[in-house]
Amino acid sequence: MGKISTQEITDLGNIASINRVFVKLIVSQPLDFGRIEIFCIEKGSVAVIDRMPITLNDVLQPGTFLSISTAGTYDIEFDASLFKTGTLFIRLAGRTTPIEWNAFLSCRVMATPLLKKKDPESAYSLPSKKIKALFVPVSAETLSTGSAKTVMLEIKTLSVPPVGSPFAEFRVVNVDKGTWLEAFDSLTDASSSGLNRVVTQGTYIRVTQEGTITVYYNITEAEKIQIIYTGANLSARAVMLEDTIQKPISGVYSSSDYKMKTLAGISPAQAVKTGSAKTLIVEVTPLTTPNTSAPYSELIVTDTASSMYLSPYDSQLNALLAPAAVNSAALGYYLRLKTGGKQTYYYDLTKTADVKFAFNGTFMSIRIRLIEVEMSLLKDKAMEVAYEGQTFILEKVDSVTVDCYMDTFVFSYNSSSIILGIAGYAGLRNTVLFNATNFPNLRTGSSISAAYVLPSKGGITRICIITNRGQIYHNYPYRAANAQGIILTGDHLLFDESVAWDLPTNVTSRRYPSKDPLESKSGFKYFPYLPDYAYEFTPGVNVDNGFGNGGYPAVNSTGSFVRSRFYQYKEPANNLVDNPWTVIQGSLTKTPKLCTLGVYQLSGSRVCIWGTEDGGRSMFVLYEFDSYVSFGNTINTSAINAYTPGNLSMQERLNNFPNAEVKEPASLFTFKPEILISSITNSDPAVVTTASPHGMVNSPLDKPLVRLIRKSGSVDDWDPLLNNTASETNAVQGTGVFFRVRVLTETTFELHENIYNPSNNLKCRHIHFTHPLKDFISFGTGEDYPYTWTLLLENRLIDAAASVNLDQRNPVSYRLNSAPNGIVRPCSFWMLDDDPENPTVFCGSDTYIGYRGSLKIPGRTNLPSRSSAGILKGKLSDIDDTSKFASVFDISEPVIYTMNLNNILIAGFQLGSNAVSLDMGNTWEAIKLGSQLKISWVDKNNHIYFKEGYRLRFK
């Protein structure tokens, strides 16, 4: 349609063929009065379809015309679908001062049968009213609410609001009850408007700035409402909604919700009874610019009973306000406001009965809320939803989490400090400086390698810190000998050194080395051939770091059950020696009675399953493998008597691995024939020369292992190096002294310590996982057969009265697999209790080439096999034949970890995917984020936290 000018009435055609009219309106200059209207002579005006925020419009029945005063171009849509007969017309009108009707308005029109969805859909489920305030001191508009539950008001200023009386104000009244309704900022997670003022009848809003304000009112108990304006210069649109206003955090508003307004200058204190509330939220809005000199704009909250000031917390609820935002006095901290705008502060009421408020300085608007939820829980909301599944919501939270358990969190650490908290994710966070003052006996050059949050049998959840130089620390230090003692306020911020205990002496013949022959007793072995640091104790023997616990002894003994200190052999060093407490995702298990860590080493440390029942204060080796990764210290014979040729012989030992034919070898080891030793140098390292070729070769996967045996002569300085009694069938291998050798020639080799378990025939590189089961903790190793093993560690003492007591007993371990066609390189293994003899098992491997058999088609040969990627399910009896396992989660990625968190399984895959199972592995739902998430742990609300700053909660 062509151009239409002012005062023209133009026929748009038969209304039966028109549902929508689209208008591009051009206003060439400001107007005192301008309007556009589309109407049917027989029926009346057609309704404007508004796109929020609404421009100014007036009410006509049964539709509207649109008022325009500002120059510009406008896109307007009219709804003609309600009119079925008659002729449709459009009319423009414009006027300036003095009264002059002219062509300052023009438009182009398109009339169409197209029906377009209204925007937003939910907002227009009921008829909407549009109203415009008159320019009089008081005006009112009464509306029937019908079945609506909420009315949305959009209030727009028509001029700059006055700063004095009469103010620009409005309120909404329940006509039948005469009460004023409370305004809310939004429909969901609603909080009352920060612009509320209070009089005896209720709240009203004073408009202090130009622009548009959107507020919501709950009208579920109002059949009619009246919108009243005071001070004029306001325009409003009311939309009736069927949605109900939702309060944030269910149930927290059961206490009173006060609102109050201060006067200028120093005001008298206003008292508030807090009742059962645990948190006070204060929203303060300066009404004028805060004073930069006396009298300052200040807010003081006082505990009525003690007269002490309550400390304000910031909106993040993680610390006291920065010093720049608070001032201190003899009675405590108070707020000094320096900026305008609404500000929110939190106060902890858990130790406070009643409070009172005092205000200094400028005009302020104050709203307070008393909430029955602890302050630490209020911030427990996600910043945004990253991904929503059928059973869960993955949320992006506002900070990363290193590790957590129940209410205790480690949020972050660096070279200088650690940030932790004991009141949940949203609770108060504390920073502990990482230095020798806070961490006793800290070695120079130390940094934090890992931080774990571990439960304990005493109910305390501890934070366990691992340093790069092989030390362990724990908070909540013991304050009595061998006992927790009385826990003092702030003990969660104090750290003491932890102790590590080796395998019990009835499991291995290894003993802690000593240079003193008089110390050759229980828990020690005279072995004076090592560097000085190999004899040091970490921590020192019976060193009390000021907590009154007396430190730790050199040997942990209960009757005949003896554990010596863990022999670390070398201080960790990058790319040379791994930290003996290094774990990867999935190799940490937390249960209330026993926590386990599986060592993941690449460059050389002992390969152990660690256990702790006191949250990391005492660490115990529960199981140790043989390995092939590293040599120990060199053997230094420079200070002993010269070797007498022919006195000793050497014998290489080989491990007998289980296999498909012999799953339980009768002999754990095989000793090759003895070879006489011609000479041993007095040097570091000692070099052995054999009388005939020894037959050994250097190999990265199998460093030769030998023992020395006395053939002739009497006891001399060489005797501590001997192992005369080890046999192929002994579980405890004689004295436990073996050597890893570096082959030089066919008749010579260097002697190095064997740091690995001398009594275990199972060899591996490192531990991939530990996993809690009903009666056990499973654990498994990499790499391929014969270095891949899946075992069960007994964990039956789980009732309330039982204790694991690792200082008195060592849990029994059971190997499960035996053959190369079974589970290889497992990164997860768990077992149901659906059959007491042959239960269902699940596993995941970090390789795709595990044995799965071949596809079968009658008459065909040479068909491929399926990969071992994904999650596999089978029966325990088939653990050595994974061709009988079926995939329960089809994904073309090998598993990196699967962790059990309160019987919720979370899996991570090699190329970045994650999945969750709520039925112990039978079904899985993918977490589609685009990158792999690494688990921190689960809190007391069953929320699972990830190190990358996400949280998973369930619907």
Image: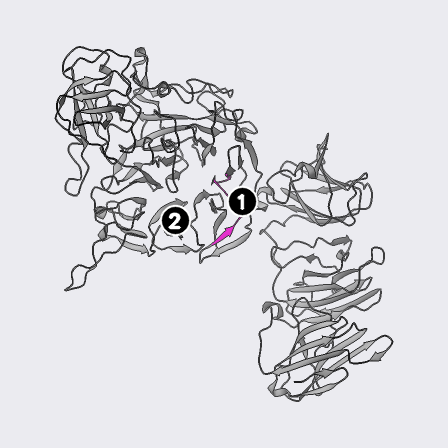
Q: Is residue 802 visible?
A: no
Is residue 398 part of the magenta span, yes or no?
yes
Residue occupying the point 21% across, 54% down: 853
- 106 to 291, vertically: above or below: below
Q: CA separation, marks 1 and 2?
A: 21 Å
**Image: magenta residue range:** 393-410
Amino acid type, callout 1: Ser
Please identify the quarter of the rendering in which residue 306 is found: top right
**Secondary structure category for the residue under label 1:** loop
Residue 184 percent across, percent down from the top left? 67, 57
Query: Is residue 434 rendered to the left or right of residue 764?
Result: right
Camera-side residue: 159 or 178? 159
Q: Which residue is mark 2?
A: 908
Residue at 84% over, 64% down? 137
Q: Report the residue that reaches farthest toward the front.
A: 745
Which of these two is toward me, 500 or 847? 847
Residue bearing mark 1: 399
The answer to whether residue 514 shows anywhere in this view is yes
Q: Residue at x 66, y 78 (%)?
A: 23
Q: Position of residue 76 (x, y in %)?
A: 67, 75
- Residue 530 to residue 223: above or below: above
